[in-house]
Amino acid sequence: MRPRKTRVVKSGGGPPGRGQGRPLEPEFLYLTTTGRRTGLAREIEIWFTRRDARYYLVAETGERAQWVRNLRADPGVRWRVGARAYSGRARVVDRGRDAALAATVRARSTAKYGWGDGLIVELRSAKARRARG
């Protein structure tokens, strides 16, 4: 049985900000989590920002997002951005403890997409490799 893929795209907020003093980067990141009930791979398409070597996602529905529930159960994740594929760990950013980071991520997301409210998730890579196909 092939793993079911789900696609989630945050709509609204206008087109992504492009060429604002930064090199162009892909609009979407493809995140694969492990289903907490099924154990199957679950892939979503989602907006992202990057800071240093880490990637940041914003869950519009917070803890209710299925992909957030999945990574809470198993923080080992995979993701693709353009031609690069990564594996690593995900964590929910604590806005109280990491207030400066949360503010930076919100500002970057708002600059790129016109939107940045929600639960922030950080992806930290073990190492990068070329994406297949």
Image (cartoon, rainbow, N blue to C red):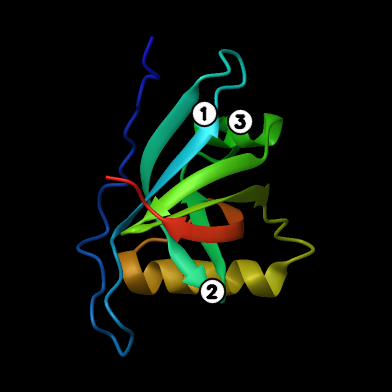
In contact (CB < 8 Å): disc 3 and disc 2: no
- Judging by the rendered image, the residue that carries numbered circle 1 is 66
Q: Quadrant of the N terminus?
A: top left
At 37% from the left and 61% from the top, the residue drawn is: 115
At 62% from the left and 36% from the top, the residue drawn is: 71
The residue tagged with tag 2: helix, strand or loop? strand
Q: Please name whichever residue, 92 or 99, is drawn nearer the observer in this view of the structure.
A: 92
Q: Farthest left residue?
A: 15
Q: Amino acid at mark 3?
A: Arg
Distance from label 1 to label 2 (Cα)? 25 Å
Q: Is residue 104 left or right of residue 93?
A: left
Q: Farthest bottom residue?
A: 21
In contact (CB < 8 Å): disc 1 and disc 2: no
- Judging by the rendered image, the residue that carries numbered circle 3 is 69
Distance from label 3 to label 2 (Cα)? 24 Å
- Judging by the rendered image, the residue that carries numbered circle 2 is 51
Does residue 97 sit above or below 61 in this rendering? below
At 54% from the left and 74% from the top, the residue drawn is: 51
In contact (CB < 8 Å): disc 1 and disc 3: yes
Q: Residues within 10 Å of mark 1 (few under 14, many from 20)?
A: some
Q: Earlier in the sequence, mark 1 or mark 2?
A: 2
Query: x%, y% of residue 12?
Result: 25, 52
Q: Earlier in the sequence, mark 3 or mark 2?
A: 2
Distance from label 1 to label 3 (Cα)? 5 Å
Figure quadrant of residue 110: bottom left
Please say whether residue 65 is visible from this viewpoint: no
At 48% from the left and 26% from the top, the residue drawn is: 41
Figure quadrant of residue 111: bottom left
The residue tagged with tag 3: helix, strand or loop? helix
